[in-house]
Image (tube, grey):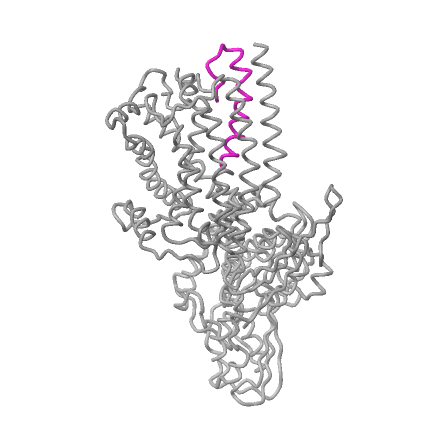
Amino acid sequence: METITKTSHGRTLRTEEMVINMGPQHPSTHGVLRLELVVDGEIVIDVIPHIGYLHRCFEKHSEQMTNYQQVIPYVDRMDYVASMNSELSFAIAAEKLLKIQIPERVDYIRVIMCELQRIASHLIAIGTYGIDIGAFTPFLFCFRDRERILDLFEMTCGARLLYNYIWIGGLSHDLPQQFIPTLKEFIVDFRKNIKELNDLLSFNHIFIKRTANIGVLPADVAINYGCSGPMLRGSGVKWDLRKDEPYSVYNKFDFEVCVGKGEVGTLGDCWDRYIVRVDEMEQSLRIIEQAIQTLPEGNVQSAVPKRIRPNPGEAYARAESPRGELGFYIMSDGTGTPYRIKARSPAFVNLSIISEISRGCMIADLCAITGSVDIVLGEVDR
Amino acid sequence: MIDWILTQFPDSILGYIIICAVPLLFILPYALVTIYLEMKMSAHMQDRVAYMRTGWHGTLQPFADILKLLQKEDIIPTAADKFLFILAPYIVFIGTYATFAVLPFTSSYIGSDLDLGLFYLVAVSSLVVVGILMSGWASNNKWSLFGALRSAAQIVSYEIPTALVLLSIVMIAGTMNMQQLSQLQSGGISDWYIFGGPFPIVKKLLLLPLMFILFLVQLTASMAEVNRTPFDIPEAESELVQGYNTEYSGMKFAIFYLAEYANLFAVSAITVVAFFGGWGSPFGSFMSGGVWDLFWFVLKGMFFVSINIWLRWTLPRLRVDQLMYVSWKVLTPFALVCMILIGYILVAF
């Protein structure tokens, strides 16, 4: 691509493009993503994402495990800011393969944990997005709230990031006594903090100027690329697996699927994707409130199989992670070792959209776009 | 004070060197205080406590930071243009430091009592751009180059509204001498130009709204000139890593850092002299003269430094084109219209 511009003197001025690497060590690529940019001054002409810097052979590792339960810590390390959701996704796939019924209390606790994790993950997405745009303070406000969620997790299972909490057929620990009261306090405080966040960042004039009408992703393109989660909903498509294909006990709760409405700009721009995440946190709080009100009694480990040896066959289950549709395909040959595990990772699929929507934008916009996709490289590369 | 120093060292260049070094007595402690202030202010805005372990509430931390920078290895990239790379930080610092020559710290001390004080200020502060461009180019790093080019475009654009604002002040005051400017406003808070200046009541009321607009223009433009959020695009850390000073380390980086903080005070001081009475006490002759002058000048200066810090930790960053938009299509027209109206008021009343 060669730009030829005529100057006022009639002479031609050829401006050359520059190839520049953004990443793998760059503050706004959220990990070790490398974007190869072709730029003409500040204008981005082409973006080529290069991935694989964090590839840890998750799928191959899983095939060497002697027990299905041993896969769960590896699943944790895929999407390390939303481990609970990955665990749930894998657990329901394995349970589908094993055809086991789990106690209702387990399902309820799983939903509470996953929704808390969704809030924690969205808080990171929102906070780091603020940094991408140049606002540092909202990031720390978000981390202050996330800290309390991590404290709740720590109280329950002792880990703050990689839990190994949701087991196939059950949970590693029951909820501690102090959990529900602490959680209730958190919900009350967090509602106020969402409002504060909206005042500080979401409806900040500069923030809107920076994100509205940037990186517009039309609904049909989003569907064609297979986007899911807030990426898809930001474009106005009402698709949420919790509602459209209820797994676990999500069909028992009343909540709304948040979609982008193009309030401040075009439908499907960065701001829409951002605000979908903010709204989803409120919906997650609603689900948690309902779940703790109707939490049944029971033993969380009664259904955990002593030995997992599924019949030969295959199963695919998917669940809504904070980043979108996270699916696990498990194939069994009748032994205790999974024959093949394949993960369908939402971040990987969402990432593929970057070069499509960021041609012709400016370098600063590219940071806004990558931030709004909310990738976790651990999950992209696996 | 200057005469006194010169008489101590008759017929010697030493006297002049000492005079040149006097602002350093202010800049170095000021930089330490401001680093501490910025860290503590940002921390308290963000529900943190910042450093607490070095000394009482971390008061010794700025010293530790400087010591660390002094000890650090001074790396010059192999492919860098060595001469320009070494020269750049000093040019940036000289550009900033030269402005301190005409800042009227007290009614009796000013480095150089130039009649063209304001003009000199606008002129030398442009020197910073040269240094920044040099550093970006010499680093041989594409991101640094981006930062340098952005910075050049930004500082050049924002000098125009600043110059227009200062020109309006010159029209009202009839002098470019910084000391005389302060002298004119020394009759207490109501004589400050932000409140219309030392004029009869009708003229004062007419000037007041215009002065307020000019003040906002000056505040915004000065923020852009020191490259701080929301105008920190030359060193936008999430886009350009660190901008023009990415490749710098050790003492050279410290000099960039020092220049940034010194510049922060310099632009605040310009605002203070132009609108807030310079070293003048807000109570007229009460609490004025001698050390009080210095106290008021530094207090007012630090007030604007704090505003800069406060905004930095609150607002997101603008994009390059939006930044240009603010300068050319918002600030410049406003300043221009205000200037014309002021001219009319001055002629008519």
Q: Look at the image and tell me whether residue B209 can be seen.
A: yes
- Which one is nearer the viewer's eye here, B146 or A172? B146
Q: Is residue B320 left or right of residue B64?
A: right
- Which one is nearer the viewer's eye here, A10 or B21? A10
Asked which quadrant contains residue B76, the reply is: bottom left
Asked which quadrant contains residue B299, the reply is: top left
Q: Is residue B198 magenta?
A: yes
Residue A116's place in the image compared with A342, above or below, is above
Q: In which quadrant of the rendered image does the C terminus of chain B lie?
A: top right
What type of secondary structure mainly makes up the magenta span?
helix
From the top left corner, tell me how far across and down residue A316 is, in percent.
Answer: 62, 77
Q: Is residue B157 left or right of residue A223?
A: left
Residue B181's place in the image compared with B82, above or below, is above
From the top left corner, tell me how far across and down residue A106 is, in percent.
Answer: 50, 71
- Give the residue furthest to the left: B8
From the top left corner, tell me how far across and down residue A273 is, in percent.
Answer: 62, 54
User: Which residue is located at x 52 percent, y 77 percent?
Assistant: A58
Q: In which quadrant of the rendered image does the N terminus of chain B lie?
A: top left
- Which one is nearer the viewer's eye here, B176 or B284? B176
User: Which residue is located at x 49 percent, y 52 percent?
Assistant: B138
Asked which quadrant contains residue A324, the reply is: bottom right
Residue A34's place in the image compared with A334, above or below, is above
Q: Which residues are magenta?
A: B194-223
User: Which residue is located at x 55 percent, y 58 percent?
Assistant: A284
From the top left corner, tell me how far across and down residue A81 is, in percent.
Answer: 49, 64
Q: Is residue A320 magenta?
A: no
